[in-house]
Image (cartoon, helix red, strand yellow):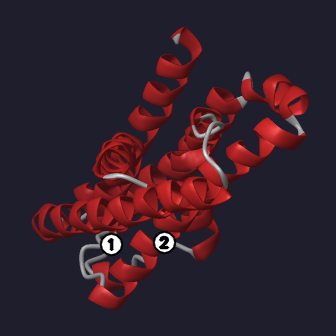
């Protein structure tokens, strides 16, 4: 493992973490009074999936490459459906909140199930990154995935801070905006992966 390997892994981590960053901002908007402990937990979920997906992809190269190639065409659809589901749910919650004039924004908490769905949706494209790690041995692949996870954690945490600050000012509209952001990310992932 060289300096170049570390830099390449960091750059790869930054690229992969952009969806998690955007989703983190949406979550911060949706949950503006989120405590730091919860922010760490959410960033850790994204980091875990960004670690796991490249490692699963790396394993696929060696064991189940034919199955993965068949499934890989569905990855953009899976990400789109998952983010449309969570984004739509957030959007509906925000509209309901406006209609009921609820001011108790501290009760807005993203359920763990939805958080795990987001983790999968934002990292599913990292499965294919495992193919780029095919030349690495298990130690190097693991190190690259760990670097990607650490980068994702910090980028996601930063996204949560930005979203939370904006969410405190936007009231009910923050949840609507967060939902729209998730829907847009789902469409963007689908468009980019389908075209590419």
Whether tag 1 and tag 2 are in contact, CB under 8 A, the answer is: yes
Quadrant of the rendered image containing residue 128: top right
Q: Secondary structure at mark 1?
A: loop
**Count of picture labels:** 2
**Residue 108 at x, y percent in the picture:** 40, 76
Note whether 29 is above or below 71 in the view shown: below
Q: Secondary structure at mark 2?
A: loop
Measure the C-alpha gap from mark 1 to mark 2.
7 Å
Q: Crowding near pointer 2: few (<14 within 10 Å), some, many (20+)? A: some
- What number is the disc on residue 110? 2
Describe residue 1's horizontal placement relative to residue 157 as left or right: right
Quadrant in the picture for the N terminus:
bottom left
**Residue 46 at x, y percent in the picture:** 48, 63
Identify the residue at horizontal 46%, vertical 74% (top origin).
Answer: 44
Foreground residue, 4 or 157?
4
Quadrant of the rendered image containing residue 153: bottom left
Residue at the limit of the structure toward the top, as seen here: 195
Identify the residue at horizontal 67%, vertical 29% (top origin).
Answer: 77
- What number is the disc on residue 137? none
**Residue 151 at x, y percent in the picture:** 33, 60
Quadrant of the rendered image containing residue 111: bottom right
Mark closer to the chain start, 1 or 2: 1
Note whether residue 101 is visible. Answer: yes
- What number is the disc on residue 31? 1
Foreground residue, 153 or 118?
153
Foreground residue, 55 or 3?
3
Identify the residue at horizontal 77%, vertical 48% (top origin).
Answer: 59
Foreground residue, 161 or 101?
161
């Amino acid at each position: 493992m060289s300096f170049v390997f570390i830099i390449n892994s960091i750059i790869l981590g930054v690229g992969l973490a952009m969806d998690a960053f955007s989703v983190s901002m949406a979550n911060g908007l949706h949950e503006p009074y989120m405590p730091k402990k919860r922010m760490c937990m959410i960033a850790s979920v994204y980091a875990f999936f960004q670690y796991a997906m490249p490692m699963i992809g790396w394993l696929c190269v060696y064991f189940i490459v034919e199955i993965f190639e068949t499934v890989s065409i569905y990855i953009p659809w899976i990400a789109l459906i998952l983010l449309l589901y969570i984004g739509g749910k957030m959007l509906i919650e925000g509209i309901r909140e406006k209609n009921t004039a609820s001011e108790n924004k501290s009760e807005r908490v993203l359920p763990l199930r939805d958080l795990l769905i987001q983790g999968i949706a934002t990292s599913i494209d990292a499965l294919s990154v495992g193919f780029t790690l095919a030349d690495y041995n298990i130690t190097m692949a693991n190190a690259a995935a760990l670097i990607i996870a650490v980068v994702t954690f910090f980028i996601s945490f930063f996204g949560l801070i930005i979203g939370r600050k904006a969410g405190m000012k936007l009231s009910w509209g923050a949840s609507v905006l967060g939902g729209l952001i998730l829907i847009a990310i789902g469409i963007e992932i689908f468009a980019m992966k389908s075209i590419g």
